[in-house]
Image (cartoon, rainbow, N blue to C red):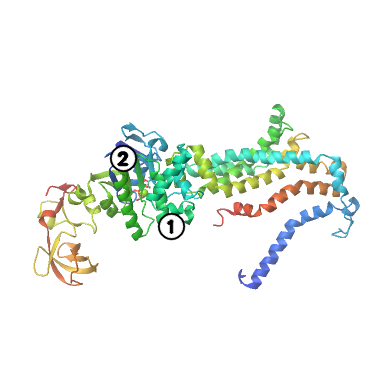
Amino acid sequence: METNFKSPTGKIAYSVFAWIVGLAIFFPILWMALTSFKSEIDAVNMPPLFFDFNWTLENYTGILEQSNYFKFAMNSIILSFGSTIIGLVFAVTCAWAMAFNPTKRTKDTLLWMLSTKMMPPVGVLVPIYLMFRDWGLLDSRFGLIMVLFLMNLPIMVWMLYTYFKEIPKDILEAARMDGATLPKEIFFVLLPMAVPGIASTMLLNIILAWNEAFWTLNLTTSDAAPLTAFIASYSSPEGLFWAKLSAASTLAVAPILVVGWFSQKQLVRGLTFGAVK
Amino acid sequence: MGAIRLENVRKTFGNIDVIPGVDLEINDGEFVVFVGPSGCGKSTLLRLIAGLEDVTSGKIMINDVDMADASPAKRGLSMVFQSYALYPHMTVYNNIAFGLKMAGESKAVIEEKVRNAAKILNLTDYLDRRPGALSGGQRQRVAIGRAIVRNPAAFLFDEPLSNLDAALRVNMRLEITGLHQELKTTMIYVTHDQVEAMTMADKIVVLQAGRVEQVGKPMELYTNPANKFVAGFIGSPKMNFIEGDYAKARDCHCVGIRPEHFAISQESGDIPATVKIAEHLGAETYLHVNADNIGPMTIRATGEVPLGEHDRIWLTPDAERIHRFDANDKALSR
Ligand SMILES: Nc1ncnc2c1ncn2[C@@H]1O[C@H](COP(=O)(O)OP(=O)(O)OP(=O)(O)O)[C@@H](O)[C@H]1O
Ligand SMILES: [Mg+2]
């Protein structure tokens, strides 16, 4: 028997299922947030304490005194926005060429670009580390921006390509007939029409860059270290301070969570674009 | 000023010869229509002139300067697209003004030109709207407005009316003809509709498979088609072609007679035939008949004709207007 999506029971069943999945996904974040308000003793209590513990802010005050949260946060902002903006410049031009002047090999090129994302990054850690060392890029924001930008470029190109494909070529040709040079054609005609696509591409990439941990942890020590490094500094070496670690994590994800919350409509639209139309 | 001359213009896509070599002379102020069946290369030829497509070889002379390698903007031509291709994110005003802005005109000049164009095209009340909130005819007018404000050397139209319904199409046809009379600017107009070609053109260019079959005034093509293809393409309903003994008796491979060039009698005549279907349109009647020893033919009679299925009739072609073709489909002298 097929569950009818439109029947009341079907609707309820799907809703319940959706809630279960949603809660399962959300639970670790909730647990992290709860733990961040516990004392270290409550944090490791067995059985786990849900809401009936002594709520405290001592982890937060401790962390903010102990380390320079704002320096890490500033690095996160610079790295994620920097890599996204540079990426956008390259991705827009690249996607323009692929969407409006395709050749026989355009599809292959796209797939090849995307396939680089399937390689585990650790495979190129050593060469990149050595390059960074020789070029003096270790622990520099510039170096990290480059790595993050290159890492996310395939996704940006792919997303923008899908968007640009939906824009009739006629309109760009009309702009050309109207005397627009290529930069003007892209800036005044293509980009305004692709605003939703560009916005969601930017958002996704900011989030990806913000959360990126592998390269940020391996290529920075202090000067360029973003919030991922901030979290890591509260893990193992100083012993198991679960509550402190949770507070650090909460502080690290809070900004991006807020951004994501306010732009969720945009994001969902962007990610499902082309799939549902 | 907009005289355009094509010299041996060729275009290949990959290894397909879409335009094998076209020579064409378009005089300043002329209304030229490219007509031909779907896929014959009309749009490609127009896009080559526009500069949206690069020529494989040949020259595109615009006012005696070879523009084959110039960017579209430098050629000073305006184009109206079949899809209108309006900028969806701009108001009607900004759509029309875009070309002027790109040309670096001052705000005051832009304002004046846009308002002027809007007045000519009845768009004044819609200047603040987005294209999405306009009807098809209005969008078409915006596209034309965008083209005229730039004061181009020539207008290029690619099937501009094919997205409109029949009534609107007739209206816009008249509007474009009127615009041409008013502006006296060269216009190149692509269509596959031979009625549009006949009614609008000063000069028709009939294309087939990327080749120019014939160039001439509409009535020249109608009365003196150079070959069977042009004879069949111009005129509606289509010319009747008769091969076999009837043609041999007239010293040719094939005889062509237009449906309107028959005298119809119920008693006697050249060709006996039986009516299969009679289409009564009021002002005229189309008879689809089966002629003895010849086969199906179409006859056009003016006014109402009291004929129907199974009626026997005799047809006499107007001897002055019989077309003859040789085995290579070339027209023979009459
Ligand atoms: N970019 C292209 N790549 C390959 N072939 C093309 C390309 N553009 C057009 N063609 C081919 O060139 C031929 C002419 O196309 P064109 O669009 O000029 O025809 P058309 O006369 O305008 O037809 P229609 O009346 O259907 O618009 C067609 O056979 C088409 O398949
Ligand atoms: Mg076409």
The x and y percentages for residue A180 are 47, 39
Which mark lies nearer to you, 1 or 2?
1
- Mark 1 belongs to which amino acid? Ser
The x and y percentages for residue A250 are 79, 49
Residue B83 higher or lower than B61, as above or below = below
Q: Classify 10 Å Cα crowding around label 2: few (below 14), some (14-19), many (20 and above).
A: some
Residue sitting nearer the eye, B172 or B255: B172
* Mark 2 sits near ligand 1, with its Cβ under 8 Å away: no
- Mark 2 belongs to which amino acid? Pro
Which label sits on residue B153?
A: none
Q: Chain of mark 2?
A: B
Mark sitting earlier along the chain (1/2):
2
Q: Tell me: B242 left or right of B174.
A: left
Q: Classify 10 Å Cα crowding around label 1: few (below 14), some (14-19), many (20 and above).
A: few
Residue A124 higher or lower than B221, as above or below = above
Please tell me in which quadrant of the rendered image residue B306 appears: bottom left
Q: CA distance from mark 1 to mark 2?
A: 39 Å
Please tell me in which quadrant of the rendered image residue B271 appears: bottom left
Residue sitting nearer the eye, A83 or B111: B111
Q: Secondary structure at mark 1?
A: loop
Which label sits on residue B20?
A: 2
Using the rendered image of the protein, determine whether residue A134 is visible from the camera's viewpoint.
Answer: yes
Q: Secondary structure at mark 2?
A: strand
Q: Chain of mark 1?
A: B
Residue A265 higher or lower than A136, as above or below = below
Which label sits on residue B135?
A: 1
The x and y percentages for residue B296 are 20, 63
The x and y percentages for residue A201 are 61, 46
Q: Are marks 1 and 2 on the same chain?
A: yes
Using the rendered image of the protein, determine whether residue A175 is visible from the camera's viewpoint.
Answer: no
